[in-house]
Image (spheres, grey):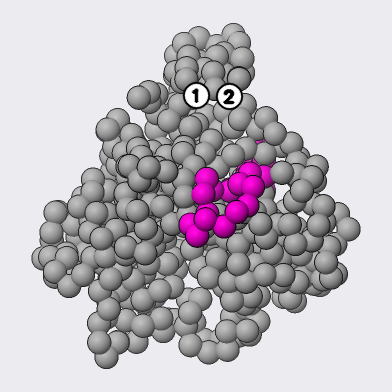
């Protein structure tokens, strides 16, 4: 009942929350809690054990990331409303069920499309949906609300720019597989920044295709129009251009098509089961940190602030393939992008005007410690084998799970998420629902229908 009250009385509840936290504050102080900038960073497929494994490899210790020191640290449920193929699962997160049997986490999981839609719009939906409700009608994205309030908006990803997660924050399509249609809608949208892979002329090792593939950029006509400045877009493609626009003056709108087809690094040639960085990386491709810097440098031109979603998308791809080395590489890249955002906030903004959220859309790969058939992190933890050594861990699936994923937040309005953490997991503790990211952001944007 209290949750329904929150959702139905948006602006009033926000004032109540702030009043509780700042009982003696004046109205001016309360207003400062409305963020000028909102940054949502999503490690696609990144569960708690992905973070721990990467920490052990890179640092030789856990709790090594900036976000692991954020004041708001919770978990988040991710289940969809309806599975795309109508598989009959109980679509919820049930703590007792989840931990009771080893196979149970494999039931009722989401894909990235409804997960992104839930985080962007506040509504659960069916598998494969991009910004559409259960009746296949368009939902309102947080980015649309931010735009109407005068902010700039953008999406950034290390996988194709029209893939499920970036699409799920901008577009409205019945199926995530409608890549060309999704790209066209994104290009025709009010976005100010769109950056990702999906270049039509390059393969996953930054080599020219024999025959170009245009589906991720909206087809040949849209690609040719983009090259001519369609809709005011400045198209950038080379590593040098991305590096140039990290600082200094920028075009008003940037669409970046990085010169790889699917992922920045994860699908490059070489031994994909090798340890991290043992296989030669694509040299002429910017990393997620660089393209994140570009996005921030464009978006912060707006004195009203901005909303941006930044995705480390290939954590998921490596996890589907159970590639330990490349999963660690991709998680490191994501963590370094987070560090770049934190540096930007502390150099160009501040935590009183910027909200930063770090989370995942779901867990992929069902990573546990090395024991068989034990998903409990208390009895089967990831084993620290020291810095530079693959930790003791085990892949138990090549698909998603219904696991709770970690959630971290810092900055303006971040304390609001504690209000939504009204459910408790027997192992992970307090958690929110993924829809409550959008609900909180709509509160903070002073939005009501």
Picture quarter with the N terminus: top right
**On screen, 441 above or below 97?**
above
Q: Is residue 91 left or right of residue 356?
A: right
Residue 229 among magenta residues? no
Mark 2–mark 1 Cα distance, whole angstroms, equals 6 Å
Mark 2 touches mark 1? (CB < 8 Å): yes
Picture quarter with the C terminus: top left
Q: Position of residue 440 (x, y in %)?
A: 50, 31
Q: Is residue 111 left or right of residue 402?
A: left
What residue do we see at 25% from left, 82% from top? 212
What residue do we see at 17% from left, 65% from top? 222
**On screen, 324 above or below 404?**
below
Q: Is residue 301 left or right of residue 31?
A: left
- Kindly tell me whether residue 341 is visible in this rendering: no
Q: Position of residue 362 (x, y in %)?
A: 58, 55
- Nearer to the camera, 137 or 361: 137
- Looking at the magenta stretch, what is its main secondary structure? loop
- Kindly tell me whether residue 270 is visible in this rendering: yes
Figure quadrant of residue 134: top left
Q: Position of residue 198 (x, y in %)?
A: 33, 71
Q: Secondary structure at mark 2?
A: helix
What residue do we see at 37% from left, 23% from top? 448
Residue 77 among magenta residues? yes
């Amino acid at each position: 009942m209290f949750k329904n009250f929150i959702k139905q009385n948006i602006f009033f509840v926000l004032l109540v929350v702030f009043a509780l936290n700042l009982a003696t504050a004046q109205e001016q102080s309360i207003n400062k809690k409305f963020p000028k900038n909102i940054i949502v960073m999503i490690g696609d497929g990144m569960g708690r054990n992905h973070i721990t494994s990467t920490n052990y490899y890179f640092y030789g210790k856990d709790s090594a990331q900036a976000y692991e020191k954020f004041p708001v640290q919770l978990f988040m449920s991710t289940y969809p409303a309806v599975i795309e193929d109508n598989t009959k699962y109980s679509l919820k997160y049930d703590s007792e069920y989840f931990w009771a049997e080893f196979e149970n986490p494999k039931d009722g999981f989401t894909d990235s499309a409804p997960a992104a839609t839930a985080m962007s719009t506040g509504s659960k939906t069916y598998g494969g949906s991009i910004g559409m409700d259960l009746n296949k009608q368009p939902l309102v994205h947080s980015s649309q609300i931010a735009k109407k309030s005068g902010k700039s908006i953008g999406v950034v990803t290390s996988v194709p720019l029209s893939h499920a997660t970036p699409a799920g924050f901008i577009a409205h399509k019945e199926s995530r597989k409608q890549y060309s249609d999704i790209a066209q809608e994104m290009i025709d949208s009010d976005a100010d920044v769109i950056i990702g892979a999906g270049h039509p002329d390059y393969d996953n090792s930054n080599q020219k295709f024999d025959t170009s593939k245009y589906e991720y950029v909206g087809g040949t006509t849209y690609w040719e129009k983009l090259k001519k400045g369609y809709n005011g877009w400045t198209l950038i493609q080379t590593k040098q251009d991305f590096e140039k626009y990290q600082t200094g003056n920028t075009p008003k709108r940037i669409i970046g098509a990085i010169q790889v087809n699917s992922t920045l690094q994860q699908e490059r040639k070489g031994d994909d089961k090798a340890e991290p960085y043992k296989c030669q990386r694509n040299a002429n491709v910017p990393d997620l940190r660089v393209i994140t810097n570009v996005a921030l440098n464009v978006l912060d031109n707006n004195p009203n602030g901005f909303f941006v979603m930044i995705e480390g998308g290939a954590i998921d791809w490596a996890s589907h393939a159970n590639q330990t080395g490349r999963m660690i590489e991709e998680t490191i890249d994501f963590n370094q992008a987070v560090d770049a955002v934190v540096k930007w906030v502390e150099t160009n903004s501040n935590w009183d005007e910027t909200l930063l959220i770090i989370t995942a859309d779901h867990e992929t790969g069902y990573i546990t410690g090395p024991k068989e058939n034990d998903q409990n992190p208390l009895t089967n933890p990831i084993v620290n084998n020291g810095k530079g050594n693959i930790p003791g861990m085990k892949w138990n699936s090549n698909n998603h799970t219904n696991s709770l994923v970690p959630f971290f937040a810092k900055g303006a309005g971040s304390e609001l998420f504690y209000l939504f953490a009204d459910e408790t997991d027997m192992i992970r503790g307090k958690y929110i629902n993924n829809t409550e990211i959008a609900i909180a952001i709509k509160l903070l944007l002073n939005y009501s229908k």
